[in-house]
Every structure is written in structure tokens, then in C-alpha cells.
Amino acid sequence: MDRGTVIPKVVKVQVVIGFIAVSLTLIALILLPPLIQKRNDLSTEIDAKTLEVKVVEEQLETNKRELEAYETQLKVTRSQIQELQTSVREQRTAPIEALVKPRASYARVTTEEAAQYPGSEYRFDLFLEVPPAQRNEIVKVTYFMNHPSFADNSLINGDPQDRFRATYFGYGCLSNVIISITLQDGQEKKLDFNQCEAQELAGD
């Protein structure tokens, strides 16, 4: 084989290689931009999904804290309900004289009251604080005013809506008031009440 035959073959190979290189370059130039765009789109989508996941995680953490707060409040509410149930049971079994609280108030007489009750300086009110569950057990309440200045020393009220209030007009309180509570079953419960120690200025 002579040299003149070898050189054309080498040239042909180089041409083929060059053509392949050019073809690959053209293919790369055609396919690479869409691939780069796809990569950028995927990167943007990944960033967006990552942000969404972060937002969801933050919301889950917030929900977790709120749930813990609700659970704490629920425990407190259950405890309060149990206390109320215990209180109701105690009220149902306790004697009524242990549940009622005598109260008293006073106020200066108005002009009309002064004209109606000459010589009176004050209006005095005696009443009972009774738990709602026990109010209907009481028929009436009688306040025995143990003092000779009372022409009628028995003040009676049977109205639970008015807290079994008794009112008189005069110039002083009594340290010894006997309160008689008449119940639906006919029983009478008595309490000793120091009006002077308990009374408060009306409106305070």
C-alpha cells in the first residue's frame, strides 16, 4: 500500500469525526435549552413545595399548641364541674340552716318614708341568701324582733324571689333576732342572728 492511498483514508476519517462532532454540537444546542428550562422549572417547583411544607409544618405546630391549650382548659373545666357536682351533693345532704346566710342592710329614710313612719330615721332590711336548689323548700321565713319597741315583733315573708325580705322603719338594729324557717315538710329551723354585726349600708 502506497502513501498516496493512506492519506485520503485519514482525511475521510477526520471528515467523519468532524461531521459527528458538528452533529453532536447541533443536537446539544437543540436539546440543551429545554433541558435547562426543565431543570429550572423543577427547581422552582421544589422550592415552592418546600415552602408549602414549611407552612404546613408551622400550621401543625400552631394547631398542636392550640390543642394543648384546649386540653388544659378541658381539664380545668372538668375539675370545676366536679367541684360543682360535689358542692351540689353537699347542698342536697346538708341541713338547710347550714346553707342559708342571713343578711341585713340599712338606709336613711326618704322624705315619703319619713312622713309615713314618723320618728323613723332608717329603713332596715333583713333577708336570706339561699342556694337556688333549696329556695323552693322554704314556705316562709319569720324574723322575731326581740325588742319591746316592736308592736308586732314577727316579720314574715314567703317570697323566695325577694330573698324572704322583711323590712321595718326605726332608729336602730337588734343584736338578737331569731329567724324561723318553715319548710315544705312542716319542719321549722331556727337561727340566731346579730343584725347589728351583719348589716351593711344599702347600695354599698
Image: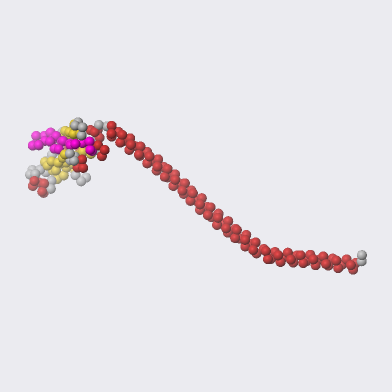
Q: Position of residue 199 (x, y in %)?
A: 19, 39
> Which stretch appears magenta?
135-156
Residue 200 seen = no
Please name whichever residue, 66 or 107, is drawn nearer the observer in this view of the structure.
Answer: 66
Q: Can you say whether 12 is above or below 45 in the image?
A: below
Q: Would you say residue 140 sits in the magenta stretch?
A: yes
How many numbered badges does the structure rendering display?
0
Q: Would you say residue 110 sits in the magenta stretch?
A: no
Q: Position of residue 66 (x, y in %)?
A: 44, 47
Q: Position of residue 83 (x, y in %)?
A: 34, 37
In the image, farthest residue toward the right? 1
Residue depicted at x 16% and y 35%: 142
Image quadrant holding the C terminus, namely top left
- Quadrant of res 31: bottom right
Drawn side of residue 24 relative to residue 52, left or right: right
Residue depicted at x 24% and y 33%: 96
Q: Can you say whether 66 is above or below 25 in the image?
A: above
Please name whichever residue, 74 or 120, is drawn nearer the observer in this view of the structure.
Answer: 74
Residue depicted at x 58% and y 56%: 46
Drawn side of residue 127 relative to residue 36, left or right: left
Image quadrant holding the N terminus, namely bottom right
Q: Can you say whether 138 is above or below 108 in the image?
A: above
- Quadrant of res 70: top left
Q: Can you say whether 125 is above or below 192 in the image?
A: below
Residue depicted at x 25% and y 37%: 134
